[in-house]
């Protein structure tokens, strides 16, 4: 049995993480901290934990093995650097940083501390994304020329960010709006699949104007070092999302339509372009569950801190490129 501390409870995914912790038998939450005392108290009551006035209490307690940081993004750096200095394993909700500078500082501190790190890129565990990653690595597509991944919902249309989660529609606190919030998942998958980035651009805009100064949707382009062109779409103003994945190569092709994967490859027996959904691997545990498993001593694969920092840097470059209407090379690429 190991002990956790919930340090910041602002993120919209916090209730889901609380439920996952309560469903486990190998960990408990000792402390909850948030600068919003009411938010801290509400989560502490659910978890049977103590509210602390400062995170220093958690840093100083050697019985706390790991911390879950779900604060506003602009509060990440202070908390992450302190957690690393205290030697605490940490789950930090995505995105890691506001941009390249703070994200890389956090990655440096995490790596220097030698602690476990994970962030919320759960799409890596889905059967379709896993399968495509395996086939890319195996060369089933030949030379990949185009790759696309999208991630959209109707959050802005539904007013999801009107009250408790309002900060997520404030780029000063969140570092981005709808494009960056959901697009970081698609960006993670594209980089996980395709590797090094040469340059990026994007077009990002509002649709409803519901959240002043906050973007709600966008399209990004990535030129990979391999020569492939990647595209991603993301936003909070979609009333449907029937498909969102395409991989096109000289010897193979894959696309998703209403949750079904269609796959063609010269290198895979029977892969003639039809529905391949029956051949997918099982889903992996959610990214948050993998973190808890790792703290508990299981050997699992986590997202690296430098990987997470790179995603913050690339997304920042997309926003800057959209503002300047140009292409940019992200910091660290």
Image (spheres, grey):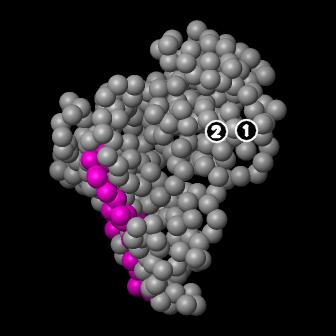
Residue 35 position within the rendered picture, expressed as x and y whole percent measured from the top left: 49, 14
Is label 1 in a helix, a strand or a loop? loop
Left or right: 206 as drawn, with respect to 287: left
The CA span between labels 2 and 1 is 7 Å
The reply to whether the C-beta atoms of the residues labelled 2 and 1 are less than 8 Å apart is yes
Quarter of the view holding residue 62: top right
Left or right: 251 as drawn, with respect to 270: left
Residue 135 position within the rendered picture, expressed as x and y whole percent measured from the top left: 55, 75
Quarter of the view holding residue 40: top right
Q: Which residues are magenta?
A: 225-251
Q: Nearer the viewer, residue 155 or 55?
A: 155
- Location of the N terminus (image quadrant): top right
Q: Is residue 287 above or below residue 69?
A: below
Q: Nearer the viewer, residue 208 or 246?
A: 208
Name the residue that disc number 2 marks.
20
Instruction: Tell whether position 228 is magenta.
Output: yes
Q: Which mark is residue 24?
A: 1
For residue 162, say whether it is visible. Answer: yes
Callout 1 environment at 10 Å: few (<14), some (14 to 19), or many (20+)?
few
For residue 200, say whether it is visible. Answer: no
Q: Nearer the viewer, residue 228 or 259?
A: 259
The residue at the point 47 percent across, 73 percent down is 261
Is label 2 in a helix, a strand or a loop? helix
Residue 252 position within the rendered picture, expressed as x and y whole percent measured from the top left: 45, 83
The residue at the point 58 percent across, 90 percent down is 269
């Amino acid at each position: 049995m190991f002990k956790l501390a919930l340090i910041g409870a602002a993120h919209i995914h916090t209730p889901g993480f609380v439920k996952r912790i309560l469903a486990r038998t190998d960990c408990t939450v000792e402390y909850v901290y948030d600068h919003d005392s009411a938010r801290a108290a509400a989560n502490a009551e659910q978890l049977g934990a103590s509210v602390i006035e400062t995170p220093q209490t958690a840093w100083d307690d050697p019985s706390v093995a790991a911390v879950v940081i779900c604060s506003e993004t602009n509060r990440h750096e202070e908390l992450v650097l302190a957690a690393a200095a205290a030697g605490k394993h940490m789950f930090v909700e995505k995105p890691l940083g506001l941009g390249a500078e703070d994200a890389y500082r956090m990655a440096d501190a995490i790596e220097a501390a030698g602690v476990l790190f994970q962030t919320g890129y759960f799409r890596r565990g889905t059967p379709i994304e896993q399968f495509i990653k395996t086939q890319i690595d195996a060369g089933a597509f030949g030379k990949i020329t185009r790759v696309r991944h999208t991630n959209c919902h109707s959050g802005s249309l539904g007013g999801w960010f009107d009250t408790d989660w309002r900060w997520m529609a404030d780029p000063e606190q969140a570092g981005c709006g709808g494009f960056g919030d959901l697009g970081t998942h698609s960006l993670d998958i594209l980089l996980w699949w395709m590797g090094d980035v040469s340059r990026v651009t994007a077009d990002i805009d509002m649709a409803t104007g519901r959240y002043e100064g906050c973007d709600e949707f966008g399209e990004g382009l990535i030129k990979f070092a391999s020569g492939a062109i990647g595209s991603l779409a993301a936003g909070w103003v979609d009333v449907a999302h029937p498909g969102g994945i395409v991989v096109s190569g000289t010897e193979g092709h894959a696309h998703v339509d209403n949750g079904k994967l269609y796959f063609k490859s010269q290198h895979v027996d029977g892969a003639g372009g039809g529905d391949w959904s029956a051949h997918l691997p099982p889903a992996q545990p959610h990214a948050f569950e993998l973190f808890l498993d790792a703290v508990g001593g299981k050997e699992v694969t986590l997202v690296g801190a430098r990987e997470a920092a790179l995603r913050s840097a690339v997304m920042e470059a997309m926003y800057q490129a959209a503002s300047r209407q140009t292409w940019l090379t992200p910091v660290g690429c």
